[in-house]
């Protein structure tokens, strides 16, 4: 019967459509979670620079990097470089890296970029950082390095990603 064939073909069409929709929604929620965390980190970094909050910025770094001897000086130097109020910025996740072991996420690292970072005095910078949102070693969760680039291509570094990634 033609009505049975039409009914069956509708079922064949609808089932794959439902699977695609559910899969898409599930993957979007994971991305959204990372994006929300990254946006929060970016906003907090900007707040720390605008308020010259060295303790707040230092608290965003992972414990492994916080133990380094130069971190306080690097933060103070960075506050001198960003010598105006940040009035405008945008961010994006440059890339994201994930490790999964037996279905469990063991590492989730993001590499956000904040650009252009526009100051009240007209200067522009680019800022990017390395941050583990998840790591099997709890001491490595947090930011490991922030890099500030000026318009001449000079880079100013806070932290040390090589403490977490020896091969970088």
Image (cartoon, grey):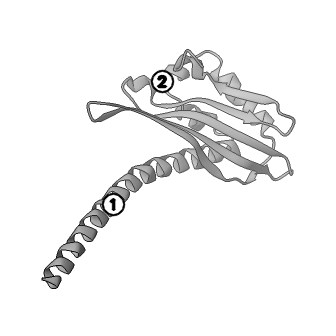
The residue lying at 63 percent from left, 22 percent from top is: 71
> Residue at image x 57%, y 16%?
167
User: In the picture provided, is 90 more to the left or to the right than 149?
Assistant: left
Left of 90 or right of it: where is 84? right
The percent coordinates of residue 10 (x first, y second) are 24, 75
Q: Report how many numbered discs are placed on residues in the image.
A: 2
Q: Is residue 148 visible?
A: yes
Residue wearing tag 1: 20
Disc 2 residue crowd, few under 14, some 14–19, many 20+, Cα 10 Å: some
- Residue on which disc 2 sits: 63
Q: 49 or 132: nearer the eye?
A: 132
Q: Nearer the viewer, residue 18 or 6?
A: 6
In this rendering, the answer to whether 56 lies above or below 40 is: above
Q: Is residue 114 above or below residue 75?
A: below
Seen as rendered, the residue at the extreme front is 1
Quadrant into which the C terminus falls: top right
Where is residue 92? Give x, y as percent.
61, 49
Front in this rendered view, residue 63 or 161: 161
Image-quadrant location for residue 154: top right
Q: Quadrant of residue 162?
A: top right
User: Quarter-wise, where is residue 80 in the image?
Assistant: top right
Provide the secondary structure element on which disc 1 rests: helix
**Residue occupying image coordinates x 52% and y 49%:** 40
Q: Is residue 67 visible?
A: no
Residue pictured at 53% horizontal, 35% vertical: 60
């Amino acid at each position: 019967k033609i009505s049975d064939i039409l009914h069956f073909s509708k079922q064949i069409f609808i089932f794959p459509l439902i699977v695609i929709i559910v899969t898409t929604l599930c993957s979007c929620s994971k991305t959204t979670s990372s994006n929300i965390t990254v946006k929060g980190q970016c906003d907090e970094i900007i707040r720390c620079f605008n308020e010259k909050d060295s303790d707040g910025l230092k608290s965003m770094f992972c414990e492994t990097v916080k133990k380094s001897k130069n971190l306080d000086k690097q933060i103070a130097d960075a506050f001198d470089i960003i010598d105006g109020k940040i009035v405008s910025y945008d961010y994006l996740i440059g890339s994201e890296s994930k490790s999964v072991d037996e279905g469990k996420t063991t590492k989730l690292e993001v590499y956000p970029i904040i650009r252009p970072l526009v100051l009240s005095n007209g200067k522009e910078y680019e800022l990017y950082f390395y941050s583990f949102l998840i790591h099997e070693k709890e001491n490595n969760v947090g930011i490991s390095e922030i890099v500030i680039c000026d318009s001449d291509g000079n880079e100013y570094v806070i932290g040390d990603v090589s403490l977490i990634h020896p091969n970088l």
